[in-house]
Amino acid sequence: MEIITHPHPTLSYKSKTIQRINSELRDIVAEMFELMYAAQGVGLAANQVNLPLRLFIVNTSADSEEGEQLVFINPVLSKGKGSEIEDEGCLSLPGVYGPVNRTRTIHVEAFGLQGNAISMDLDGLLARVVQHETDHLDGIMFLDRMNPLSLKTLQADLQEFELEFASRQQGGIIESNDVIYAKLTEWEAKFCTQHV
């Protein structure tokens, strides 16, 4: 498992609702935390490790020894109030930052890794991270939330990521889009379908 970078197709793929929490999913989450801490991130969505599952993890301290490790499965956001603009970055766009306008406070309903219901009112950094990661699950990058003028200043950086991705895909280091989509479908069958 590794963190994929822009413009990998899974990053613009809308994740499916998880129907099943099992030991395999718990192992995936544990590995996601390891990757997130190694990259010094505060949040990581399943899309960012090439999985089409409505799941993300957060620890706003970016340190495994500190803060609280939170897992959000099938999150639903509501009751957004206020707005503020802050610079955001993304583990799928290392080194790239830009101003994003987000809701200041937000309510989240989700499930934890034990199937427990989560209901939280969030503000500050945690509210921003939860909004950023929920966007990932809908195939939305923070770039998509930036105003056109700010985005223009990042064009050279983004082009570099796009050229790098294209050359890695042509060189067979990254699978073709068809293979990527076929594998996403397999993951959905495993975790996102109801078994009768």
Image (tube, rainbow, N blue to C red):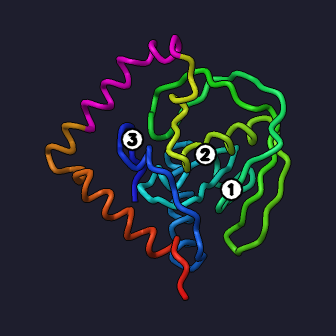
Q: Residue furthest bottom?
A: 196
Marks 2 and 1 sit apart, C-alpha to C-alpha, by: 10 Å
Residue 46 located left or right of residue 174: right
How far across and down, in percent of the image, does residue 70 sit? 70, 57
Q: Is residue 164 magenta?
A: yes
Marks 1 and 3 sit apart, C-alpha to C-alpha, by: 23 Å
Q: Residues within 10 Å of mark 3 (few under 14, many from 20)?
A: many
Q: Which of marks 1 and 3 is in front?
A: 1
Q: Quadrant of the N terminus?
A: bottom left
Which residue does the image show at 70% across and 21% down from the upper left? Answer: 85
Q: In which quarter of the image is the C terminus?
A: bottom right
Dot 3 or dot 2: first in sequence order is 3
Q: Is residue 115 magenta?
A: no
Which label number is shown at residue 133?
2
Mark 2 residue type: Glu
Which residue has dot 3 on it?
5
How far across and down, in percent of the image, does residue 175 sit? 23, 54
Q: Nearer the viewer, residue 50 or 188?
A: 188
Label 3 element class:
loop
Residue 33 located left or right of residue 167: right
Which residue has dot 1 on it?
75
Residue 182 located left or right of residue 110: left
- Is 117 placed above or below 106 here? below
Circles 2, 1 touching at the beta carbon (< 8 Å): yes
Which label number is shown at residue 59?
none
Mark 3 residue type: Thr
Q: Residue furthest front?
A: 196
Query: Which region shows up in magenta?
Result: 148-165
Q: Residue furthest left?
A: 171
Marks 3 and 2 sit apart, C-alpha to C-alpha, by: 15 Å
